[in-house]
Image (tube, rainbow, N blue to C red):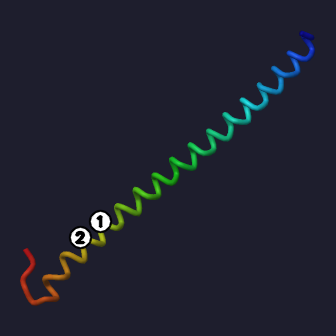
């Protein structure tokens, strides 16, 4: 087989590999950012749920614990 053909194919595969690695890194960064955002939202939901839980007994006329 012609070495020039093999070298050209190798160069093409290296380019595809590099492109794939770059895309994977971008997707992993987006996934990490999304996980952080969901964690912040979850924390805010927990705080609001606790605040609503504290207000509900006071509104019903029963003393809060």
The image position of residue 3, as x and y in percent, is 90, 10
Label 1: element kind = helix
The image position of residue 31, as x and y in percent, is 53, 48
Mark 1 Cα shell of 10 Å, populated few (<14), some (14-19), many (≥20): few
Residue at image position (92%, 11%) is 2
Q: Nearer the viewer, residue 51 or 27?
A: 27
- Residue 64 versus residue 10 in the image, above or below: below
In the rendering, which numbered label is found on residue 50?
Answer: 2
Label 2: element kind = helix
Residue at image position (51%, 47%) is 32
Tell me: 6 left or right of 29: right
Image quadrant for the C terminus?
bottom left
- Residue 9 versus residue 43 in the image, above or below: above
Mark 2 Cα shell of 10 Å, populated few (<14), some (14-19), many (≥20): few
- Residue 39 versus residue 1 in the image, above or below: below
- Residue 36 versus residue 5 in the image, above or below: below
Q: Confirm or deny contact between disc 1 and disc 2 (CB under 8 A).
A: yes
Q: Nearer the viewer, residue 65 or 20?
A: 20
Residue at image position (40%, 56%) is 39
Q: Which residue is mark 1?
A: 46
The image position of residue 42, as x and y in percent, is 36, 61
Tell me: 16 left or right of 1: left
The image position of residue 7, as x and y in percent, is 86, 16
Q: Which quadrant would residue 62 be assigned to in this image?
A: bottom left
The Cα atoms of the two marked residues, 1 and 2, are separated by 6 Å
Residue at image position (46%, 52%) is 35
């Amino acid at each position: 087989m012609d070495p020039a053909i093999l070298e050209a194919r190798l160069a093409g595969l290296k380019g595809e590999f590099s492109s794939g690695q770059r895309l994977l890194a971008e997707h992993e960064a987006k996934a990490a950012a999304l996980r952080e955002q969901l964690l912040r939202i979850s924390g805010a939901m927990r705080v609001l749920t606790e605040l609503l839980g504290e207000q509900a007994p006071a509104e019903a006329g029963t003393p809060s614990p």
